[in-house]
Amino acid sequence: MSHNTQPSDKALVPFVSVDNMMRLIHHVGIEQILCDLAAYIEDDFKRWELFDKTPRVASHSDVGVIELMPTSDGEAYGFKYVNGHPKNTSEGLQTVTAFGLLADVYTGYPVLLTEMTILTALRTAATSAMVAKFLAPKGADTMAMIGNGAQSEFQSLAMKAICGITSVRLYDKDPAATAKCAANLAGTGLDVVICKSPEQAIEGAQILTTCTADKQCATILSDNMVGVGVHINAIGGDCPGKTELAAGILSRSDVFVEFPEQTRIEGEIQQVAEDFPVTEMWQVITGAKPGRSSDRQITLFDSVGFAIEDFSALRYIRDRIKGSDFFFELDMLADPDDPRDLFGMVQRAAP
């Protein structure tokens, strides 16, 4: 299939396939893309008040969840379709798949359609590291990566590229997942340490990232495991009834969130009272609220993923593919010469 980027009389929509997303990553370099995405996300967090904001629209079933994540800044509109099916791993399928669309608010016409399974992993990692830049202790050089599934390498490389970590300590209850992650990170410049327990993984780590897939309330980190002065990056909680941290950790931490109305439904803070105090991350980035204020403080980013981060990623891909061959053009829009004569267009297409 040729990479068709030529303009035509038709209103054609750029489509970034999985193949082209991977080509783009190798062309730009994964660490550079992570840095670029983090910059786009930070820029949009600074414009947070401009955006439409709503908790994602979720359709739950016994086996998983399918969600839509929409937002708009008044000029562009974006949404992501994403699923979460933990049982898929045992069937040889991805736990999470996604695609996204960006549209022009003025015309309502889509301007980009893209795969977002890979792009979501990139934007999630970029968000984690962008936040850690504000909240992690100064000079942090070691991260514990608990849960070594599909997100783990992206998280590790984002923390390296954006926060300067040099070592990652890996643990997963499935040793094969840890071996996979360690092999994938070989040659990246990170010192990779394989650990036999969560307790061993967090030894000497200033950043603790939890990213597990089980759709249940679990205790990946117990209260007595977490000492003072660390930054916790909790990204596994993403639906009601799924948490990773002991509730006692929350009471000792300063908790930072994306959008409280969504995080209270899906994040670690679903375990605590509705009036439990949290700080919205955009307020830290704009300087309206403090982030890390002491060496002994435990900071916790209770991340569930939010539509504005996907919007930032869509915006980045739209800008990055201009003038390139990293997309196809799709004939998605019925666009007759006379906007009132849709029927006539159909009739004239008769074989």
Image (cartoon, rainbow, N blue to C red):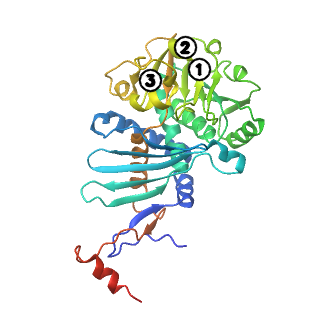
Work out which quarter of the rendered image holds the C terminus and state it.
bottom left
Query: Vertical placement of 65 versus 193: above or below?
Result: below
Work out which quarter of the rendered image holds the N terminus and state it.
bottom right
Q: Nearer the viewer, residue 21 or 340?
A: 340
Label 1 crowd (10 A; few <14 / some 14-19 / many >=20): many
Q: Where residue 158 sits: x, y (%)?
A: 55, 37
Verify CB contact (< 8 Å) between mark 1 and mark 2: yes
Q: Left or right? Give the position of 245 relative to 44.
A: right
- Mark 3 vs mark 1, CA separation in Å: 17 Å
Residue carrying label 2: 229
Secondary element at image label 1 = loop
Residue carrying label 3: 256
Q: Earlier in the sequence, mark 3 or mark 2?
A: 2
Residue carrying label 1: 206
- Mark 3 vs mark 2, CA separation in Å: 15 Å
At 57% from the left edge and 60% from the top edge, which residue is drawn?
Answer: 19
- Mark 1 vs mark 2, CA separation in Å: 7 Å
